[in-house]
Image (cartoon, grey):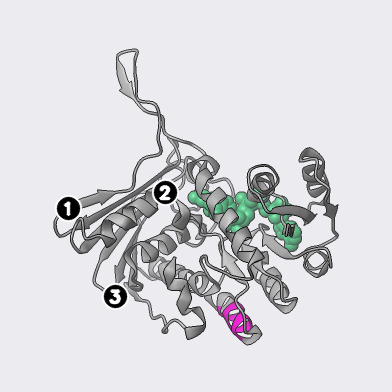
Amino acid sequence: MVLKIGVIGTGAIGQDHIHRISNTLSGAKIVAVTDVNAEQAKAVVNNENMDAKVYENGHDVINSEDVDAVIVTSWGPTHEEFVLASIAAGKPVFCEKPLATTAEGCKRIVDAEIAHGKQLVQVGFMRRYDKGYRALKHVIEHGRIGEPLMVHCAHRAPSAPGCTGDMALTDSFPHEIDVLRWLLNDDYVSAQVILPRNTRFAAEGLQDPHIVLLETKQGIRVDTEIFVNCQYGYDIQCQVVGETGIASLPEPSSVLMRSEAKLSTEILVDWKDRFIDSYDVELQEWINCTVKGEVNGPSAWDGYVVAVTADACVKAKHTGQIVPISIQERPSFYIKQLVL
Ligand code: NAI
Ligand code: NAD
Ligand code: ISE
């Protein structure tokens, strides 16, 4: 069976996912697209040379008889509406992060999915599919560095044109929030945010960088520098300090150069390149599972927990306080999600 997919939002990542499904992956085709910018949606269909219909809006895509499953890649504030509509239509939906822009919005999705009685939602936390993070998890789970005690992370982007308000915490940092709880098999109990001296490259009125300190249930301390105008590259770092050793996320492979009196390797600059393999694996697994009627990846529950944690970070930033994070037990409906 070829899975017929409708895509809502043909911006940066929407175009990327359309391209990989049409050219790199197997078992699926794009049959429907939409974007509030209709011209852009039409241009994407033309450029990709696809046999896909351009619909008026997201709801028409979701409700089209031609569409088996939905991908939501529109901007964050629209996600909740389209995911809820997909659940109402009983269709599997892959939603880019964030699942919704508030924890309450994510909870409404969780409640709707449980009421529907069958899992339909997967959230685009692709780092769980990254070879490097998977290797790091393997090292930890095989006791090669003893019990993890501390984690030092950095999430750096060269510039952040669309990053406004607290989006460094609610749009960029969620990748760390998700991948670290998966890596450590743990959840968070508190958040604190420290505001260093501001870079002159941040847009007027915006804080950059941030340092976020999270504490987990097991007492592991995680510090993350989020620096979205760092100029020099897109650089993701993660170092786990254990009782008997230290394990670091592998750097992306790059030719080691000896040239012009320098020993050097390149640093990537674009997020699209840094996790390109992970997006491929993530979406291929989503297609394969969807065809079998299963959801195996990051769930609506994971999207909810990330949003609760991000909300606590925002509160910690604005109050200067250590903010407790209280997350209820994972509903039994989502227990099988622990496998990934
Ligand atoms: P973008 O701004 O390039 O694209 C968003 C698109 O959605 C735009 O074309 C916009 O016109 C369209 N759109 C907005 N509202 C819409 C609506 N109601 N109906 C239909 N289309 C609508 O943004 P980008 O960078 O592609 O990000 C999209 C989403 O993907 C965001 O949620 C972002 O957080 C996520 N993302 C995830 C990444 C990842 O690594 N997993 C990387 C980049 C983005
Ligand atoms: P973008 O702005 O390039 O694209 C968003 C698109 O959504 C735009 O084309 C916009 O016109 C369209 N859109 C907005 N509202 C819409 C609506 N109601 N109906 C249809 N289309 C609508 O943004 P982007 O960089 O592609 O990011 C999109 C989403 O993907 C965001 O949620 C972002 O957080 C996420 N994202 C995830 C990753 C990742 O690494 N997983 C990377 C980039 C972006
Ligand atoms: C984007 O929204 C993402 O999700 C990328 O993975 C992230 O690292 C980038 O900085 C964001 O803009």
Q: Nearer the viewer, residue 155 or 24?
A: 24
Please state the quadrant of the image where ligand 2 appears: bottom right
Q: Eyeballing the image, is 225 above or below 262?
A: below
Asked whether mark 3 lies closer than 8 Å to ligand 3, one says no
Q: Secondary structure at mark 2?
A: helix
Crowding around mark 2 (Cα neighbors within 10 Å: few <14, some 14 to 19, many 20+) is some
- Residue 70: x and y in percent read 71, 63
Which of pointers 2 and 3 lies earlier in the amino acid sequence?
2
Residue 317 is inside the magenta segment: no
Q: Nearer the viewer, residue 74 or 245?
A: 245
Residue range highlighted in magenta: 107-114
Say which residue appears at 35% left-offset and 57% top-offset.
Answer: 195
- Residue 20: x and y in percent read 64, 45
Q: What whole-number distance in Å separates the C-alpha atoms at marks 2 and 3?
A: 26 Å
Residue position for label 1: 245
Q: Which mark is residue 217?
A: 3
Asked whether mark 2 lies closer than 8 Å to ligand 1, one says no
